[in-house]
Image (cartoon, coloured by chain):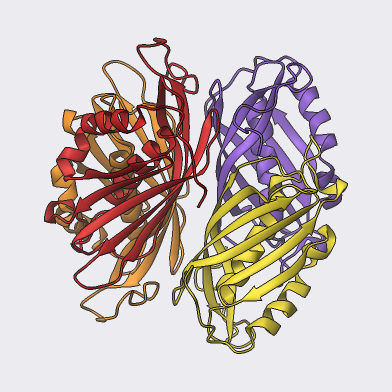
Chain colours: A purple, B yellow, C red, D orange
Amino acid sequence: MTEYQASNPAFVEEIRQSFAKQTIMGLIGASLTRVEPGVVEITLPYRADLTQQHGYVHAGIVTTIADSACGYAAYSLMPPESDVLAVEFKVNLLRPAKGELFVARAEVIKPGKTLTVVRADVVTTSGAEDRSLVATMQGTMMRLPKRGVTGSTPGALPPS
Amino acid sequence: MTEYQASNPAFVEEIRQSFAKQTIMGLIGASLTRVEPGVVEITLPYRADLTQQHGYVHAGIVTTIADSACGYAAYSLMPPESDVLAVEFKVNLLRPAKGELFVARAEVIKPGKTLTVVRADVVTTSGAEDRSLVATMQGTMMRLPKRGVTGSTPGALPPS
Amino acid sequence: MTEYQASNPAFVEEIRQSFAKQTIMGLIGASLTRVEPGVVEITLPYRADLTQQHGYVHAGIVTTIADSACGYAAYSLMPPESDVLAVEFKVNLLRPAKGELFVARAEVIKPGKTLTVVRADVVTTSGAEDRSLVATMQGTMMRLPKRGVTGSTPGALPPS
Amino acid sequence: MTEYQASNPAFVEEIRQSFAKQTIMGLIGASLTRVEPGVVEITLPYRADLTQQHGYVHAGIVTTIADSACGYAAYSLMPPESDVLAVEFKVNLLRPAKGELFVARAEVIKPGKTLTVVRADVVTTSGAEDRSLVATMQGTMMRLPKRGVTGSTPGALPPS
C-alpha cells in the first residue's frame, strides 16, 4: 500500500463531524472506527432489522458502509475547503453477509485533483473464524468546493 | 422494451412474500409498488434519518432499493423453486437524492438460465417537478436452486 | 430518449477528425457511422484476427468500439475547446460476439459540466436474424479544457 | 495475497494453448508473460497503431489485455474440462496509457464453483520511471463445462 500524506490538517475532525451528520449511520448502527490518510474504516454490528430475505445483511447496507468509507478515504487526502461526493461505484458480492460484525475498509488507489479512485473491502468476523471477504467495491469520488464557502452548486451536477 | 413471459405462475405472490421478509425494507420505509414479468418497482419516501451529511438520501439506501428491485425483476422470470442473489452491481449517481419520493424501477435486460442482467433507474419527484433520474444501476443476478428444496449451499459460494 | 442540443456547432466535424486520429480504429477496421447530439455509433465488421479462443470477437474489442462511441457521444454535448477522456466504464457481456457486423450505439444518460454519464449497447446482426444485444456499457466521461488551448495537463490526472 | 492451489495439473499448458488461439493478441502484439495459480500477466509493448486521438494506448486495448489476464487467472484455479468466459468487468482509468510497455497483472480475489471474481492492475514502465498504475479492473468470470466434452451451450447464454 502507498503511504499518503494529508494536506488538510483538520481531516480527522472534519470526517468525524461529517460522519455524525450522516443520519443513516445512526439508523443502522454503524460507527467510524479508523481515520488515517487515505484509509477509513466503518464498522457495523449485525442486526436482525438490516437483512434481506434469508437473514443476511442486505447488499445495499453493505454498500452503504463501503460507500461512506470510500468517500471519507478520498476526503482525507483532499485540500481544506473540499466537499466529496460519490460519482459511481461497483460492488462484487462475494459471500453471504452473515456474521457478528462487518468492517468496511476503504483505501485510496489513486488520488486526484478532481477525481479520486478508491477501493473498499467489507470483511466479517464470526466467532473464532478468520476474516472473510464479503464484498469489494471499486469507485470514483469527486472533490467539490465546500458549500457555504463558495455557494456554488456541484460542477458536475447541473440543475435538473 | 422487450415483453417477457413469466414461467413461474406464482412469481407475484412469492416476490411479495420475500419482500416482506427483507427487514431492511421495513426499517427504511420502502414498499413494493409494481411486480410484472421482468419489471419491479420499489418506492421509498424521503425520511430525515436516511441521509448523508447534506441531508440527501444516502447513495447506499438508493442502492438498497435498486438492488432489491433488480433481484426481484430477475426472479420474476425464473422458473419455480429458484432463489436469487446479487452477483454484482454498478451504480452511477447522477443527481443529489433530494425529493419527496424515490422510485427504483428495475427491468431485465437479458434473462439467462444462471445469470440475468438487470438495469434499474431511480427517479425522484419533488412537488410539481418532472421526474429526475437520481441514479442508474447495471447489475448481474444469479439463480440458485431454492434452499430447503435441495438443501444445497449456493454453487458459486464455496465455504469460506 | 431525451433530445439533446449540441452547444458546439462543429461537433460533427471535430468528432470525425478525432476518430481519424484513433489509429486503433484503423487497425481493427472500425468506422464511425452515426454522429448526432448525444448519440454516436461505431460499426465493426467481423474479422478472424479480432477474436478470443473460440472465434468470437474479443470482449476488449467490443469494449474498444463501445468506449469510443461513449466518449464521442459525451463530446457531442460539450462546449467548444473541450477534450474528453474516459474515467471508467462497466461492461456486461450478454452473448458471444459472433456475427458479421457489430454496432456500438452510445447515448448520453446525463450530461454535466465536468462529468457525463453514457450508456452503449453493442448489437450484432447475422444473416436474417434479429439484432442481438452482445454487450452493454455504462460509463463516465470527463470534460477537460482542450490541450494546446490551455497547455494544461488533465486536472484529474496529477503527474505520476 | 492468498496462495492458491491449482486443481488442474495441465493449467499452464492449456492457458498457453488458449492464448495462442486468441488471434487479437497477435494483432496487437501482446504476449503471455506469467502463469501461476490465481495469477496471470499479459505484456503489451507500445505501438503507434494502438492509440486513441492523443497517441496513448486506447482504453479498449488496455481492457483487452486486462480481460484476458483475468479470464486466465480464473481458469488457472478451475477443474479440468472447464471453459471460462467473462460475465462483466469494470475498469477505472487512472492515468493516460503512455509508456513503452504495459503489463496487465490479474489476480483471483474469490474463486468459486461457477463464478470467480478477479482483479487486474495494468501498469506501465517508461524509461527509468517507477511503475505507474494506468488502469484497474474488477470483474466476474464464469466457469462452463468444456465445449466438445459436453456439447452443451453455455448455461448462462440461452439461444438469442
Residue D73 picture location, percent across and down: 34, 53
Residue A97 vs residue D76, the one in the foreground: A97
User: Where C155 falls versus D53 (above or below)?
Assistant: above
Quadrant of the snapshot with the C terminus of chain D? bottom left
Asked if residue D62 can be seen in this view, the reply is: yes
Q: Which quadrant of the view contains residue C150? A: top left
- Horizontally, is B6 left or right of B95 in the view? left
Residue A117 vs residue D109, the one in the foreground: A117
Q: Residue at x 46, y 74 (%)?
A: B114
- Horizontally, is D67 left or right of A73 in the view? left
User: Where C22 falls versus A46 (above or below)?
Assistant: above
- Number of numbered discs on residues: 0
Residue B157 picture location, percent across and down: 53, 67
Q: Which quadrant of the view contains residue D114? A: bottom left
Residue C127 picture location, percent across and down: 19, 70
Residue A10 picture location, percent across and down: 76, 17
Residue B27 vs residue D70, the one in the foreground: B27
- Horizontally, is A40 left or right of C93 in the view? right
User: Where C42 falls versus D115 (above or below)?
Assistant: above
